Every structure is written in C-alpha cells, then in structure tokens.
Image (cartoon, rainbow, N blue to C red):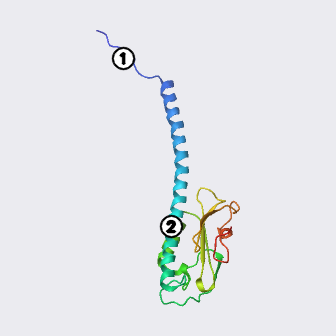
Amino acid sequence: MKMNFKRGFTLIELLVVVAIIGILASVVLASLNTARSKGSDAAIKANLANMRAQAEIIYADANCYSSAAGVACAAAAVAPAACPSTAGTVFGNTQVQAAIAGVLAQGVTAACSSTANQTSWAIAAKYKSDDTKAWCVDSSGKSKEATTLAAGQGGATAAVLATGLCAQ
C-alpha cells in the first residue's frame, strides 16, 4: 500500500486563514478599547458617588462641609478649578481626597468648587470615553451629565459653578 505524503495546506490557504484571524483580532481589540473607556466612566461615577456619601457624613458631624470635626465652618470659598486639598473644606478630608484620587487615576481632569462657610460644594470629572462630557455631583444631591464642555478643554471647570452646584 502506497501512502500519499502530499497532503496538507497550500501556502495560499494558510495566508488566507492568517488574514482572517488578523481581521477578527482587530475587530475584537477595537471593541475592547470602547469597553475599557466605558469602564473608566463607571469608575468615575462610583468614586464621585462615594465622595458625596462621605461629604454627607462630614455634614452630619459639623453641620457644614468642613474637612474635620471641630473645625469651624469658616473656610474661604473654593473657586471652580482643579480640586485642592485645602484644610477646612470638604476637599481637605482624607476620604474625599481618596475618592478624588480614584477619579484622577482614570486619566481624566476634575474640577471642584465650594461656597464660603462650606455650605455647598460640587465636583465634576470629564469622561474618559467622551472629551466633551463630564459627570457632576453636588451637595444638593444632583448627579448629572454636563454636556457643555468644549472638546479638548483642559479641565471640567465649565460643569461646576462658584455657588457650589453643578451647572445647568
């Protein structure tokens, strides 16, 4: 009995299979990047929600959004800008700073503001998936998307107001 050793795949067949696998891999990687950005957006929203919960604990203790129990609620206002860690403000609290650090770890920018005497505050962080939108949380209980940002704007300052609230 004679065996035929010429079985197998031709070079053309192998190249076609490799090309198809390459195309499928590029489609999967493209959709994976979108999912990764949306995951970052979800992490931003979760960190800001955690910050609001911590701020309300602070308010329950001090009757204002001061950074520490027993600290007078007379801190100066924080103008809409990058989030400071100013003592006497809600942004000086270590748990709040950790939530803000979690937001910034997503590779986005954030902006904070608060009123004098620390009676209200707001924080907004740009989305990772869309440079023209941000998620804003404030002391009035609002959690909303701000869509008034210009593409490529350095910060999320357009989403927070000097009154310590999210922009309408």
Report x, y in % for residue 127.
59, 60
30 lies above or below 95? above
Label 2, label 1: how many angstroms apart (C-alpha)?
64 Å
Q: Is residue 157 left or right of residue 137?
A: right
In the visual, does 150 lie left or right of 60?
Answer: right
Q: Quadrant of residue 78?
A: bottom right
Q: Nearer the viewer, mark 2 or mark 1?
A: 2
Q: Which sits in the foreground, 43 or 73?
A: 73
168 relative position to 64: left or right: right
Name the quadrant of the N terminus.
Answer: top left
Left or right: 58 as drawn, with respect to 136 = left
Within 10 Å of disc 1 (Cα), the crowding (few <14, some 14-19, many 20+) is few
Kindly identify the residue that appears in the image at 49 percent across and 81 percent down.
60
Q: Nearer the viewer, residue 141 or 88?
A: 141
From this viewpoint, which residue is outermost toward the left?
A: 1
Q: Secondary structure at mark 1?
A: loop
- On the image, the x and y values in percent for residue 11 come to 48, 25
Mark 1: amino acid:
Phe
Residue identified by numbered label 2: 47
| Mark 1 lies on residue | 5
Label 2 vs 1, first from the N-terminus: 1
Q: Secondary structure at mark 2?
A: helix
At x 59%, y 75%, the residue is: 83
Q: Nearer the viewer, residue 4 or 96?
A: 96
In this picture, is 82 found above or below 62? above
Residue 37 numbered mark, or none: none
Q: Quadrant of the C terminus?
A: bottom right
Label 1 near label 2: C-beta < 8 Å?
no
Residue 30 percent across, percent down from the top left: 55, 45
Amino acid type for the residue under numbered disc 2: Asn
14 or 2, which lies in front?
14
Q: Residue 154: image x %, image y %?
A: 66, 66
